[in-house]
Image (tube, helix red, strand yellow):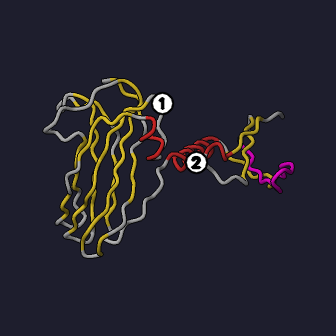
Amino acid sequence: MQTAKTSLTDLGAPPRLNLALGRKGAVVTRRTGQNSNVASLGSFRLKGSLLIACLVLGSAVAIAPPAMALDANLCDVVVQDLHMSIQHGGIDVTATWNCRNVPTTIGQGLNLWLCPLPAPADEAWIVGNCTPKGFNGDSVHATVTKKKYSKTAPPVAQPAAHGNGWWIACTLWSSNGPGGQTTSRYAFSRSMELNG
């Protein structure tokens, strides 16, 4: 029986595992060394829906965003996907914060950028290669524990952004609350191709 070998590392699994797909299921094997041949773990076979569940779980792990540590005020941020806003009349982005230690003030800005290429989550690359298209420097005042507070760039009172290409948003933020004044940290959206 011939099998096509596919590495589980391509699917987000640990690099020491391999998956050999064949007609009757899949055989999971383990590498015995960095450059060595693959050694079989025996007759461990996955079939049908179990194989699909493993592949789906593996790909879900691979695309999950990295967890961000909470700051001293137990705040975190999510920079949402950029989108064409019908209400705003163009492209905008929203970031949401929630804090467990309140009252807390979140300062600094949310920036929207238009880039010629897909942008990495790297401020120096973005500043050197992209055009600023929106900014919101309003502070966020969190007064209720775990409530989501948001701001949009450009602010809703200003015209939305327009242009064709790859867009990315980032926020440089810090919080000041019961846990003290925190150091600044970055959070980025996904880079997305939008025309608007």
Q: Does residue 156 appear to the left or right of 134 in the view shown?
A: left
Magenta span includes 60: no
- Based on the displayed image, in which of its 4 quarters is residue 30 positioned? bottom right
Task: Pinpoint residue 22: horizontal percent, then vertical percent.
Answer: 75, 36
Residue 58's tag is: 2
Mark 1–mark 2 CB contact (< 8 Å): no
The chief SS type of the magenta part is: strand
Identify the residue at the far right of this view: 37
Task: Pinpoint residue 70: horizontal percent, then vertical percent.
Answer: 38, 66
- What quarter of the picture does the C terminus occupy? top left
Q: Residue at x 35, y 37 (%)?
A: 113
Q: Residue at x 33, y 44 (%)?
A: 80
Tell me where the magenta segment starts and ends, as one range.
26-40
Pointer 1 local density, CA inside 10 Å: few below 14, some 14–19, many at least 20:
some
Q: Residue at x 76, y 35 (%)?
A: 4
Mark 2: secondary structure: helix
